[in-house]
Image (tube, rainbow, N blue to C red):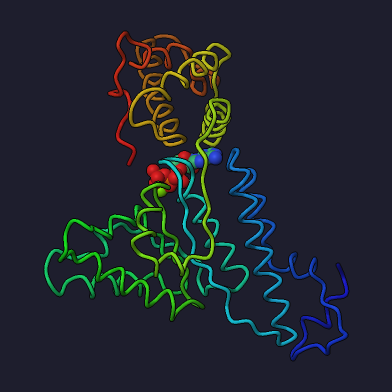
Amino acid sequence: MGEESQVTGPGAPNDDTPVDLEAEFNDSRVQEVLDTLDRELIGLRPVKTRIREIAALLLVDRLRKRYALTAGTPTLHMSFTGNPGTGKTTVALRMAEILHRLGYVREGHLVAVTRDDLVGQYIGHTAPKTKEVIKKAMGGVLFVDEAYYLHKPENERDYGQEAIEILLQIMENNRDDLVVILAGYKDKMERFFASNPGMRSRIAHHVDFPDYSAAQLMAIAKLMLAEQNYGFSPAGEKAFADYIPLRMKLGHFANARSIRNALDRARLRQANRLFAGKRRPLTKRDLMTIEAEDVLASRVFGEGATDTDATPTH
Ligand SMILES: Nc1ncnc2c1ncn2[C@@H]1O[C@H](COP(=O)(O)OP(=O)(O)OP(=O)(O)O)[C@@H](O)[C@H]1O
Ligand SMILES: [Mg+2]
């Protein structure tokens, strides 16, 4: 740290002037984003490591530019694969922030879309629709959720192909001002890339989001509650620990998203429980605490439980 004046001054340093990687790193304030990522997201070790690696690559690229070691802007388009609720959208938002802090995109905003935002119903509608979305995303990140639905092999005249062609062009020609992240299930994405090799070749980083373990889901639940100034009573925590594996076995399980939904319902039951006993004055602790009964009333504990306790994943 410290002697950074020579590298931040105007013009290129001569070949013998060392650049200070650490000072550069501190200046970019990327560490803040990485720290927030660490703090706010439980688990995701491999994802966090990949994000760190990409940040390192960009930082070194920036330093190389100081010596006029041109190599062209690195390709930064990515694919985020994983099951629903594994944190893809959340991490994409952080990625946009990192890209912005390192100067790879002007604004650092994220525009999240699906097929319906890009593809029109009628002939001639798709190109303007796709271009409008791209215009909004310029200077930031375009996040295409369930990107494989752009490609419908069973329908020869599908307009999705038109959106893909436009995306491919932009991904090649506007690399320095737009980063595209394609997200979705791993197997479907694999098939999509297999039939769209042009798309695969434009993606530099494939990041895979693993499912969470029961213990990680518990940690996520506690974090989510704490963020909203709630907490489990000891019995409430025990009940939720029983809830998690039961919920994981039911259909439509969506990792952290299912946990968020379950907590929303527990809050609802807590409010109703407090309301039903309203003659008694309530303490701050009462208002904050999720008790066992708020969890155990879930249908997941019922005989022949179905997934009706779970709202759809989106
Ligand atoms: N590791 C984690 N730690 C804490 N909260 C998490 C974690 N992963 C996800 N969440 C939370 O779970 C919810 C769902 O996450 P997110 O929307 O990022 O998932 P996703 O992979 O994009 O899901 P989908 O495929 O359904 O769009 C968000 O509220 C997010 O904050
Ligand atoms: Mg998402």
Question: Camera-side residue: 187 or 96?
Answer: 187
Q: Residue furthest left?
A: 122
Residue 252 position, x and y percent, is 33, 31
The quarter in which the N terminus is drawn is: bottom right
Question: Camera-side residue: 282 or 78?
Answer: 78
Residue 218 position, x and y percent, is 55, 26
Question: Camera-side residue: 136 or 127?
Answer: 127
Q: Is residue 50 left or right of residue 148?
A: right
The quarter in which the C terminus is drawn is: top left
Residue 291 position, x and y percent, is 48, 14
Q: Is residue 43 above or below residue 193?
A: above
Q: In the figure, residue 137 lies in which quadrant?
A: bottom left
The number of callouts visible is: 0
Q: Is residue 198 left or right of residue 215?
A: left
Name the residue rendered at 55%, 56% in the picture: 94
Name the residue rendered at 52%, 40% in the picture: 210
Name the residue rendered at 39%, 62% in the picture: 111
Q: In the figure, residue 120 lies in which quadrant?
A: bottom left
Q: Is residue 36 above or below residue 241?
A: below
Q: Is residue 120 above or below residue 13?
A: above
Residue 108 position, x and y percent, is 51, 67
Q: Is residue 54 above or below residue 83?
A: below
Name the residue rendered at 58%, 74% in the picture: 74
Question: Camera-side residue: 20 or 198?
Answer: 198
